[in-house]
Image: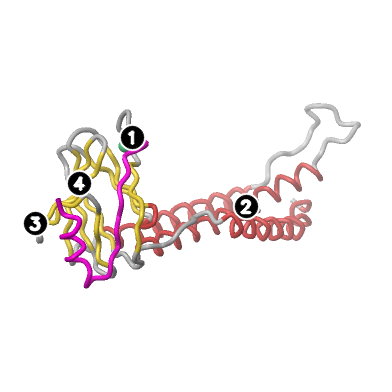
Amino acid sequence: MSDWKKAVPLIALASAALALLLFNVLEWVHLMPGVQAAREAVIIDSAFDNVVRVTVVIFAVVVAIILYTVVFFRAGPDQGEGADFDASPGKMVEVVWLAASCVLTFGLAAYGSEEFLHLRHDSHAELDVQVKAAQWSWEFFYPAQNVNAAELILPKGKRARIAITSEDVVHALWVPAFRLKQDALPGRVTTLYVTPTVTGEYDIVCAELCGLDHSVMRGKVLVVEPEEFEAKLKGEAW
Ligand SMILES: [Cu+2]
C-alpha cells in the first residue's frame, strides 16, 4: 500500500502529461471535421468532445498506472516466474475504483441521454418534409406546399420536421454536416428535427447497407435563406 501512496504523484504527473499530449493530438487531427451546418451539429459535437475529454483523462490515468507497474514492479533477476507477491490492491482501492466507474458510467449515460432527448423531444417545427427512401435514391415531399423535390431544400434558421420512411428495405438518412442520422424503415415513419444554420449544399448519405448500389445512394441538402426558400422549392420541383 505504501508503494502505491509513493506512486501517486508520479502517476498523476505521467497522466497529466499523457492527457495533454492526447488532447493536442486530437485537436490536431480534428475528430469531427467539416462544417457544423445545424444547431444540432453544435450540440452533438460538444457532447462528443466532452465524452472524449473524459475518456482521454481515464485512458491517460490507466496507461500511467500500467507504465508505473511495468517499470517498478518488474520481477528481479533473482525472482523466477510465479514469484510470491501480493497482487491485491487493497479494499479501499477496489471500492474507490468501482464507485468512480459507476459514477462515470451513469454520469455519461445521463448526460448523453439528456442531450439526446433534448434534440428529439421538442416536436415544434416550422416546416414539414416527408422523405421516402428506395433502392437507391431519396425523394422529398413538402405537404404544405404540395411539392415533390429531388433535393432536400431547407430554409436557414427554421426548425424542420423530417418524417422518413422506406419503400423497400432499411436505409438510413445521414447528413454529416448536421451530425444527424436516422433509419428509414419500411412500414414505419421515423422523425428527425433539424434547424440548419449555415447556407450551402451538403451531402446526404445512406448509412445502412441496402443492396448493390448502397454506396452510391447519395442525395443533396440545400440550405437556403428563408426568403429564397419558396422560389427554390418551386425551381427544384418535379
Ligand atoms: Cu444504403
Q: Residue at x 36, y 55 (%)?
A: 202
Q: Which residues are magenta?
A: 215-238
Of callouts 2 and 3, which one flags the residue occurring earlier in the amino acid sequence? 2
Estimate the spatial distance between the alpha carbons at disc 4 and disc 3, rounded to whole Å: 13 Å
* Residue positioned most to the bottom: 227
**Which element carries disc 2, helix, strand or loop?**
helix
When asked about the image quadrant of residue 157, the answer is bottom left
CA gap between label 1 and label 2 equals: 53 Å
Q: Earlier in the sequence, mark 4 or mark 2?
A: 2
Ligand 1 within 8 Å of disc 4? The answer is: no
Amino acid at pointer 4: Glu
Ligand 1 within 8 angstroms of badge 1 C-beta: yes
Tag 3: amino acid: Asn
Residue that mark 2 sits on: 92
Image coords of residue 216 (percent x, y)? 35, 38
Q: Is mark 3 within 8 Å of ligand 1?
A: no
What numbered label is drawn on residue 139?
4
